Image (spheres, coloured by chain):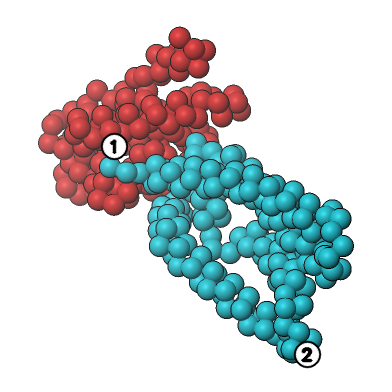
Chain colours: A cyan, B red
């Protein structure tokens, strides 16, 4: 018999590991991209490349902060709070749109800025506005697909946990 | 033996009867009792570092036992039964009625009470299990997380409904 708490623990522990790994990954990316695009003395690097690199570094920094707060949130999860409080926390933790979902818009825009700045030099046959549009034509669908995969994953994996907690909490209501 | 193991043994040693009783309320058979009991012990072991003494140890243990039992999913959740027996020292608190309590001692009445209790929702069963433990309304509200007046009203309603049904079938 698998309990809701067992399922939650498995899921929370998995995301605790993932967020810890992402923290490490983003630290590596920040150091690598800072060295390659910002502090690199290579004169062949254009100002656009350096600005694009700065956008990547900022993207990874914001993602690092998001994952750090997620890690802290997961680390403080307590399954032995009063029952209703514990269930409310589960519902909050497993909702589709979190404050960090909104916060992710910042690095997504920064990443778009970085890619645009880095790639507009590659489409020299086009006018500037078209160069920007070409990058967007790739970036926006990729992000939209990533978002849809995320929603589908939430629907399959997290929604059942949230629904079960909501169902239990509803039973408590007078 | 590590300090954590010693502390765990001490907690279980001092509260084993309490934990076993709560698990028994929810377990329809020995097999499921073992599952729930084991799960509760695992949860105690994993959560020991979180106990900061803000509530009584007993309250904290009841929370673990109730949260674990209530979180059983699927068929197991729907099958969750509240098992009582004549030796429960707080059985009389369910009825608050002396004449009824006398009748309870007859086995068929006890069976009726058992049926009535098992017709309650899972949450109400959890509340009644805590009543059977002789806990105060304040302690129950601390475990479940509902306000004290809310717990009081809810338990009163459950008791009234059980009493009415028992009288009707008498």
Determine the residue positioned at 51% across, 50% down.
A90
The image quarter in which residue B93 lies: top left
Q: Is there any visible trace of residue B91 in the rendered image? A: no
Mark 2 Cα shell of 10 Å, populated few (<14), some (14-19), many (≥20): few
Judge from the rendering whether residue B165 lies leftward or rightward of residue A39; answer left or right.
Answer: left
Gap in angstroms between the C-alphas marked 1 and 2 = 72 Å
For disc 2, the marked residue is A127
Determine the residue positioned at 43% across, 31% down.
B43
Determine the residue positioned at 86% across, 68% down.
A47
Looking at this view, name the residue that lies furthest to the top.
B1
Q: Which mark is residue B26?
A: 1
Q: Nearer the viewer, residue A153 or A45?
A: A45
Residue B132, percent across and down?
Answer: 35, 31
Q: Quadrant of the N terminus of chain B?
A: top left
Residue A157, percent across and down?
Answer: 42, 58
Mark 1 Cα shell of 10 Å, populated few (<14), some (14-19), many (≥20): many
Q: Quadrant of the C terminus of chain B?
A: top left
For residue A156, above or below residue B158: below
Determine the residue positioned at 67% across, 80% down.
A136
Say which element carries label 1. Answer: helix
Judge from the rendering whether residue B110 lies leftward or rightward of residue B140; answer left or right.
Answer: left
Residue B92, percent across and down?
Answer: 31, 30
Q: Nearer the viewer, residue A149 or B69?
A: A149
Q: Which mark is residue A171?
A: none
Q: Nearer the viewer, residue A155 or A20?
A: A20
Are circles 1 and 2 on residues that touch, CB within 8 Å?
no
Say which element carries label 2. Answer: loop
Looking at this view, name the residue that lies furthest to the left.
B108
Report the label total: 2
Q: Is there any visible trace of residue A137 in the rendered image? A: yes
For residue B86, above or below residue B128: above
Instruction: Pinpoint the chain carrying mark 1.
Output: B
């Amino acid at each position: 018999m698998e309990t809701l708490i067992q399922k939650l623990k498995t899921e929370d522990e998995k995301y605790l590991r993932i967020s810890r790994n992402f923290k490490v990954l983003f630290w590596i990316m920040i150091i690598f991209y800072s060295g390659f695009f910002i502090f690199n003395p290579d004169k062949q690097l254009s100002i656009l490349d350096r600005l694009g690199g700065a956008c990547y570094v900022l993207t990874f920094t914001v993602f690092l902060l998001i994952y750090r707060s997620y890690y802290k949130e997961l680390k403080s999860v307590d399954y032995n709070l009063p029952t209703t409080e514990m269930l409310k926390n589960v519902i909050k933790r497993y909702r589709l749109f979190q404050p960090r979902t909104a916060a992710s818009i910042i690095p997504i825009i920064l990443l778009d800025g970085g890619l645009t700045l880095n790639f507009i030099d590659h489409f020299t046959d086009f006018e500037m506005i078209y160069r920007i549009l070409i990058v967007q034509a790739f970036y926006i669908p990729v992000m939209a697909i990533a978002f849809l995969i995320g929603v589908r994953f939430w629907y399959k994996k997290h929604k059942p946990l949230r629904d079960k907690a909501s169902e239990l909490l509803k039973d408590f209501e007078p | 033996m590590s300090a954590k193991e010693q502390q765990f043994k001490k907690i279980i040693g001092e509260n084993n009867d309490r934990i076993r009783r709560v698990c028994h309320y929810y377990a329809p058979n020995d097999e499921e009792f073992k599952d729930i009991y084991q799960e509760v012990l695992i949860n105690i072991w994993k959560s020991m570092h979180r106990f900061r003494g803000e509530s009584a140890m007993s309250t904290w243990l009841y929370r673990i036992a109730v949260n674990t039992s209530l979180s059983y999913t699927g068929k197991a959740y729907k099958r969750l039964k509240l098992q009582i027996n004549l030796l429960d020292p707080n059985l009389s608190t369910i009825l608050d009625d002396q004449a009824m309590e006398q009748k309870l001692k007859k086995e068929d009445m006890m069976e009726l009470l058992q049926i009535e209790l098992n017709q309650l929702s899972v949450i109400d069963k959890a509340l009644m299990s805590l009543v059977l433990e002789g806990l105060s309304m304040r302690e129950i509200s601390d475990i479940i997380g509902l306000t004290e007046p809310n717990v009081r009203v809810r338990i009163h309603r459950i008791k009234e409904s059980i009493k009415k049904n028992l009288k009707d079938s008498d």
